[in-house]
Image (tube, coloured by chain):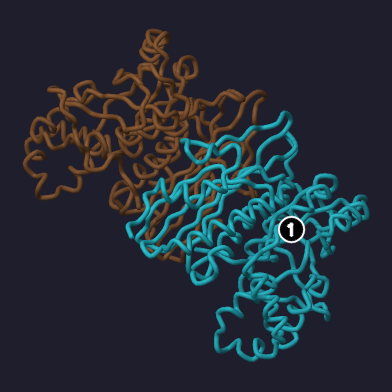
Chain colours: A brown, B cyan
């Protein structure tokens, strides 16, 4: 059977996902209709097969993950998703069923998050599959929540639990040295950690709480320790963090009990897609109540303090936890 | 010397290009401040080394070309550039001088087109270099010029000249069968065609003329014949085009004289990044005057007529010009 043309491919797989601003993917550009008094947050992420995801994972899951990574950036800005663009570079080996699964997962997630496809570009590549997603979100005019606005004395909160995805990735890789702790996990715990790597949960539901009470926020993509350092150093702040206060899942705790050296992976492995945010002390109670109403677990982990050093992590005995590297780095 | 971290790479090469909505590239998202009564046109293009550009070309020129391909989409929508996002997947072999040249070319073109960098993502790839640019442009609210709005009787205009870039690409590839016509060209004509492939000229200056008089517009990326067909079929129209009326450059005419079989390459080779647009007959004179005032050459090539067949190209004797394929297709 001959391969479909680019236009046929778009109309077969992606036109069904097109939102009202996409004109059936038949135009040079999509359209974002901005409402009065709103600004638009724009974010983009590139994901490469074999680098950012396992090529053999279900295509729908791969699509969902890359969309959700972008939605997590919008969540950190307390933005309301408006739509996204999809850039896709397909290797020669793509198949109809693969692309169909990819489009289905993408379409379901786009619908679930009210974030329709507005346009894109599909090309062929001699290299690995590349997925480049750009997402748009509405924020109140002139008041998007930034990373670089933490004040000394602000409480630092984190959503959900930290380190699960990084543990899930090590579990997927299954290096020989990891066999003892991996084999010590229950099947349910192993599946939980693997699932947290496979499919992040963007914290869009925290929007109201962030808009009402947060002074600053960042999403954790490159590791809790490194992203906390990034946020704090923009206003020359630091923090002492008791490791015992960092929220871990039951599965994460089980892994850590089996291999205490996993602390570094948990704190700096990345791929969490949880939100770190700074709340002035007077707003903490209200923030916690609003987060709870939105069903987003939040944990206070530290207080921002003046200082130029990166945040210090301390164990139960008050000793510094040393991290081989504070965060995931591509280069 | 050790490689810079991702953050160091961004602050060294890309932070200097950051516009006011980019916050020094230190946040999760960039910000587009929409003005009241404006909508935002969004467009994205992925370019792969060895597929969309020659990897050995100067890095600044590669950067400019990919930005300009996006600006050409904005030009077709009569949009005013607001900024762009850069997704970059670098192979292991990247060097500081290469990236420095890339950033310099990109920065100069961004400044020349008032289109600042608003954010991006830089990752490492085991495959070829990938450049994914998303560009934003302001359009009057609720009235972006679309492709699919041509009416029967509209005159079809094209900017500039057609086919130069496709000839330039063949010239760069230098296949043995092309040697006769390539060698017959003057050095100036050869350089002109190669330059048209290397650096498109987005027709942003046509904005006022398009907004005032155009019923529909499309930018020619995949070939004059195919993109004209795409625009016309959206409203079930067709056209007869005299090949002699299609505007060619002096260099293009010289190539065609040497090898009349180049007609197909000229009409359907792509990479023109000129604008095709439909003007109601009563507005043609005013459109031509406004385009001339903006220093954008425009040529009337056909009249839209009812019919479902693709546009028919005819030679001086009225015979149909057959095209092996109407446009460039990736798949």
Which of the chains bears the disc numbered 1?
Answer: B
Residue at 57% in and 58% down? B104
| Residue A12, x across and y down, in percent | 50, 50
Q: Residue furthest front?
A: A307
Specify few, some or many for label 1: CA neighbours under 10 Å numbering under 14, 14-19, or 20 or more: many
Visible residue check, residue B317:
yes
Is A284 placed above or below B173 here?
A: above
Tag 1 residue:
B275
Label 1 SS? strand
| Residue B315, x across and y down, in percent | 79, 78
Q: Nearer the viewer, residue A313 or B71?
A: A313
Is B45 placed above or below B240 here?
A: above
Residue A21 left/right relative to B216 = left
| Residue A322, x across and y down, in percent | 20, 36
Visible residue check, residue B322:
no
| Residue A194, x across and y down, in percent | 22, 38
Residue B153 left/right relative to A222 = right
Is B138 placed above or below B45 here?
A: above
Q: Quadrant of the N terminus of chain A?
A: bottom left
Residue at 72% in and 81% down? B189
Residue at 88% in and 55% down? B293
Instruction: Give the quarter of the image for residue A240.
Output: top left
Residue B105 left/right relative to B316 = left
Q: Nearer the viewer, residue A235 or B61?
A: A235
Numbered label tally: 1
């Amino acid at each position: 059977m001959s391969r479909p043309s680019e236009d046929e491919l778009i109309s077969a797989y992606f036109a069904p996902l097109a939102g009202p601003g996409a004109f059936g993917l038949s135009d040079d550009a999509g359209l974002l209709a901005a409402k009065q008094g709103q600004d638009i947050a724009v974010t983009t992420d590139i994901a490469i097969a074999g680098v950012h995801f396992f090529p053999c994972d279900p295509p729908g899951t791969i699509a969902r993950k890359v969309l959700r990574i972008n939605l997590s950036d919008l969540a950190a800005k307390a933005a309301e998703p408006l739509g996204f663009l999809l850039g896709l570079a397909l290797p020669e080996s793509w198949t109809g069923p693969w692309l169909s699964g990819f489009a289905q997962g993408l379409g379901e997630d786009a619908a679930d998050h009210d974030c329709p496809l507005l346009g894109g570009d599909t090309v062929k590549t001699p290299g690995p599959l590349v997925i480049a997603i750009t997402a748009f979100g509405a924020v109140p005019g002139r008041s998007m929540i930034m990373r670089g606005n933490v004040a000394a004395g602000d409480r630092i909160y984190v959503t959900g639990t930290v380190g699960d995805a990084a543990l899930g990735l090590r579990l997927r890789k299954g290096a020989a040295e990891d066999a003892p702790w991996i084999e010590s996990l229950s099947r349910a715990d192993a599946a939980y950690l693997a699932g947290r790597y496979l499919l992040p949960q963007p914290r869009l539901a925290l929007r109201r709480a962030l808009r009402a009470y947060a002074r600053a926020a960042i999403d954790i993509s490159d590791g809790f320790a490194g992203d906390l350092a990034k946020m704090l150093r923009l206003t020359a702040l630091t923090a002492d963090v008791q490791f015992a206060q960092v929220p871990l899942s039951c599965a994460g705790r089980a892994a850590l009990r089996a291999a205490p050296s996993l602390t570094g992976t948990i704190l700096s492995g990345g791929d969490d897609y949880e939100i770190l945010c700074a709340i002035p002390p007077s707003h903490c109670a209200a923030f916690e109540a609003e987060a709870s109403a939105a069903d987003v677990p939040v944990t206070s982990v530290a207080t921002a303090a003046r200082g130029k050093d990166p945040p210090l992590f301390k164990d139960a005995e008050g000793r510094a936890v040393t991290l081989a590297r504070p965060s995931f780095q591509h280069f």
